[in-house]
Image (cartoon, rainbow, N blue to C red):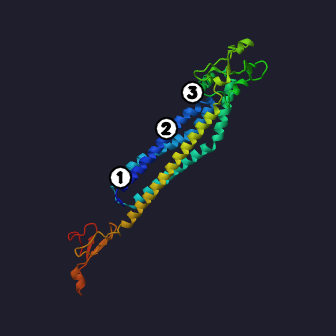
């Protein structure tokens, strides 16, 4: 095929590479946020998240494989003559590419619409983790690591720890007491701010006072712990991930539309120049020549100029169009 304008092949290659890079970014960003989001969830909720994100992984892989393989296809097409088979191949390729990008956008939109499901699942999972903080070592490790890394405390706030069923209740208040004008709060050590005086002046372990068989809990002052909950951190990371996915999906659609328009323009130019656009072909006098194509099994008539000028019936030569020489002609 002939390039309809200068550097047309370079633009095609650039668009194909961009689509493949978008697929790679989809996989990389999804893998990163998959790791981040599952850090807030139990094993059951992690499987749910994996099920939703699996289709995004597939979408990214399809973009990479399809458009990288298309580089080789286009490189071969430029060296071949434009035929109906080539045009059919490009039409099928464009249709397949549109199906991939359209289904990928539908997948991203489905995950976007399920944001509330992710939030409710994370909230339920984290609340259950507080209730199982001492009975399940996995949840204790998850909560301790989460509160240390994200610098948060509890699901919605630090009060979630104080309202737990297993938490010992302080005298005079259901959730906290006041010692020396300072509010004492019961929470794990991981809620404490770095470099602060974590334990209040009473320096008393509440669990030991009330004969609790579990590990004792220290009491903190309000200004020594993180008061923000961990669920808002999860929600912020979730929405950031969804917005990035939507942006990459729309970018993929945008460059695919550009690729479709450019391909259709190339095919149109090939059709216009196929057997009709012969302005560059002229005879010795400068008159344009018209090239007429025949099937291989059709014989053509060769009539000389002398025959056209005379009244005598010309000698008709039947020659094969592929090689119209005197030796191959039949008289």
Image quadrant of residue 225?
top right
Does residue 291 lie above or below 174 as drawn? below
For the residues labelled 1 and 2, the Cα–Cα distance comes to: 31 Å
According to the image, label 3 marks what residue?
149
Tag on residue 230?
Answer: none
Identify the mark nearer the N-term, 1 or 2: 2
Query: Which residue ends up furthest to the right in the rendered image?
Result: 172
For the residues labelled 1 and 3, the Cα–Cα distance comes to: 53 Å
| Residue 56 shown left or right of residue 222 in the figure | left
| Residue 267 shown left or right of residue 193 in the figure | left
Query: Which residue ends up furthest to the bottom in the rendered image?
Result: 311
According to the image, label 2 marks what residue?
28
Tags 3 and 2 in contact by the CB under 8 Å rule? no
According to the image, label 1 marks what residue?
76
Secondary structure, mark 1, is: helix
- Of 95 and 85, nearer the camera is 95
Q: Position of residue 94 (x, y in %)?
A: 47, 54
* The N terminus lies in quadrant: bottom left
Other residues around mark 1 within 10 Å, as few (<14) / some (14–19) / many (≥20): few
For the residues labelled 3 and 2, the Cα–Cα distance comes to: 22 Å
Q: Nearer the viewer, mark 3 or mark 2?
A: 3
């Amino acid at each position: 095929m002939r390039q309809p304008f200068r550097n047309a092949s370079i633009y095609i290659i650039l668009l194909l590479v961009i689509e493949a890079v978008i697929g790679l970014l989809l996989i990389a960003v999804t893998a990163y946020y998959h790791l981040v989001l599952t850090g807030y969830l139990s094993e059951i909720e992690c499987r749910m998240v994996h099920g939703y994100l699996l289709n995004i992984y597939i979408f990214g892989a399809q973009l990479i494989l399809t458009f990288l393989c298309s580089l080789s296809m286009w490189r071969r097409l430029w060296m071949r003559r434009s035929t109906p088979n080539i045009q059919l191949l490009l039409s099928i390729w464009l249709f397949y590419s549109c199906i991939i990008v359209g289904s990928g956008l539908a997948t991203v939109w489905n995950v976007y619409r399920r944001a509330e499901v992710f939030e409710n699942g994370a909230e339920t999972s984290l609340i259950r983790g507080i209730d199982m903080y001492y009975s399940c070592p996995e949840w204790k490790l998850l909560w301790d690591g989460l509160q240390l890394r994200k610098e948060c405390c509890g699901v919605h706030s630090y009060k979630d720890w104080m309202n737990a069923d297993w938490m010992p209740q302080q005298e005079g208040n259901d959730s906290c007491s006041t010692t020396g004008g300072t509010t004492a709060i019961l929470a794990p050590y991981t809620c404490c701010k770095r470099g602060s005086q974590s334990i209040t002046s009473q320096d008393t372990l509440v669990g030991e006072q009330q004969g609790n068989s579990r590990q004792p809990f220290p009491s903190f002052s309000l200004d020594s712990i993180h008061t923000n909950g961990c669920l808002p951190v999860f929600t912020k990371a979730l929405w950031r991930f969804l917005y990035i996915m939507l942006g990459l999906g729309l970018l993929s659609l945008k460059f695919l539309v550009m690729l479709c328009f450019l391909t259709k323009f190339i095919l149109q130019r090939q059709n216009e120049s196929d057997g009709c656009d012969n302005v560059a072909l002229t005879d010795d006098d400068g008159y344009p020549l018209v090239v007429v194509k025949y099937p291989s099994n059709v014989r053509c008539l060769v009539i000389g100029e002398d025959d056209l000028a005379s009244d005598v019936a010309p000698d008709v030569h039947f020659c094969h169009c592929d090689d119209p020489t005197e030796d191959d002609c039949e008289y």
